[in-house]
Amino acid sequence: MDEPCYTCRRRRIQCDRSQLPCLKCQKAGLTCLDKRPVRWVQGVAIRGGMRGRLHQDDSVSSKPVGETLTRSTIPAELPHPPCPPSYMAVVPTEAKLTSVPLSMEDPAVSNLDATSRYYLNYYNDRICELFIVYDSQNNPFRSLISLALSDTVLLKAVLALAARHRTNFEQPFSTNGTVAYPISVNTEKDALHFKYHAIQGLSHSLNGGNSYQDATVASVFLLVFLDLIESGCDRWNYHLEGAKSLMALTPSHNPGHTLQRIRKFIVKQIHLIEALGATFVRPQLLSKSMSIEESPNLLQDVVEESFLGCPEYILTSLQYLSLQRDVMISGKVSDHTSIQDIISVFDGVEEFDCYSWASTLCQQSVTRDINDLCKLARTYQIGAILYGRRILDALLKEETTQELLVSELIGIINSLQHGSNLLKCTLWPITVAGLECHLQSQRDTLMHALEQFWMDTRCLNVTNAAKILQTHWQKIDDQQAVANDWIFDIGRMSHDWLLI
């Protein structure tokens, strides 16, 4: 190619101009466009006095829309609405939405209004892919669609998740909270509308005295992910505790295959969220979940049903280490036996074989890249080692140098930015690396990774992670904090963070 492709120009990255499609678009999984795509406009002009004005035509509504609409934003399976919502205009061209895994002739789908159908497709295409390591037809988030079409509350939660993510899409990465960026009024209104009705519906269901359904649990579960998109602080723990309580109360006798998979997935993700979430919150904020003990099969890693790709062994070890940190904060002195137990768990994390773990999972899905999955597991392993070592240092009154591990972790994070879609799973390791690093070059690398993470996910908890790291670095540089005490300090901050 003589000129850089339109897709790279729009992403503000340097195109390699090697071929069409270019290598960067291929690696990112985007449609490589050589020029700006044709846009369909509702009206005779995009702006100015004729904006939204239509030629007289009985077959077309004369209601002004006032925005452009890209051809690729309308799923082929959906009929073209006479007055498409204006926010459909600014969906990136490369983000072609796929159809929901149901027949569009299904009354449950065809009876939805155009706005709901749009966000349902957005959820299917964007959200389901976002919150899973590898997307597939077996994606548990996608399985929620059929359940949502028979439950109004769950449907509102699904639509709220999609609308909020869509609202974030045009915002740039920034750690300056005082700067207000323009957002689509329509998508913001839609997000608030759907969230309000989801919470109101949940309140009615919980106060109605009826037996709780799996859809109710799923609705609460999705609110945790909604909080990740909105901020990642202060509300997710309430939703998590609510989901755990409802899971214990919801009858599970003889569920169908789909519901059984959904229940199993929700239980596993609750375990993951509370294991990683406990590392950055106040002591004993989260209650111990008993649901994970229902069946040993729940502890088995399945690459097609994994939210973050963190090995279960690492998660369980982190949960134990966080518990020991909380014991120290409470003022209780661990005896020799307890210290030996912590050392034993720590040694187990160090000896964990990431390549063997990745190889076993990839045998279930031969299309997956063993090396990338191994790298992802290694980021969590190193993060757990750094975290566990600081807990041992506090117990043993030691100060261990961890520069080599930090450098390795940052190097792996940096490598996942190129040719892999797994960076979206590494916010927790990125944060741990940032809390441990001291070199400005390392900090710059991590901030770049966080910016790329934002571009990949559009979850606002990543901007909060960046702010946390910048505040931490400033305190360390000003000698207002002890570098190795971050395992305690981050839980004493003004918010309870879910940085995953």
Image (cartoon, helix red, strand yellow):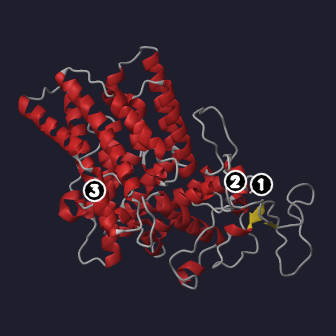
Q: Residues within 10 Å of mark 3 (few under 14, many from 20)?
A: some
Question: Which residue in the protein does label 3 denote?
Answer: 357
> If you read the primary sequence from the N terminus, does the residue marked by circle 3 or circle 2 appear first?
2
Q: Distance between the residues labelled 1 and 2?
A: 7 Å
Where is residue 241? Give x, y as percent.
32, 51
From this viewpoint, is residue 498 visible? Answer: no
Instruction: Confirm or deny contact between disc 1 and disc 2 (CB under 8 A).
Output: yes
First in sequence, mark 3 or 1: give its number.
Answer: 1
User: Which residue matches tag 2?
Assistant: 17
Task: Tell me which residue sits at (71%, 58%) in the image.
Answer: 90
Contact, mark 3 vs mark 2 (Cβ under 8 Å): no
Q: Which amino acid does label 3 sit on?
A: Trp
Residue bearing the label numbered 1: 2
The one nearer the camera, 489 or 214, is: 489
Residue situated in front as seen by the camera: 151 or 121:
121
For the N terminus, the image quarter is bottom right
- Helix, strand, or loop for circle 2? loop
Q: Which of marks 1 and 2 is nearer the N terminus?
A: 1
Q: Which three-letter amino acid code belongs to the residue tagged 2?
A: Arg
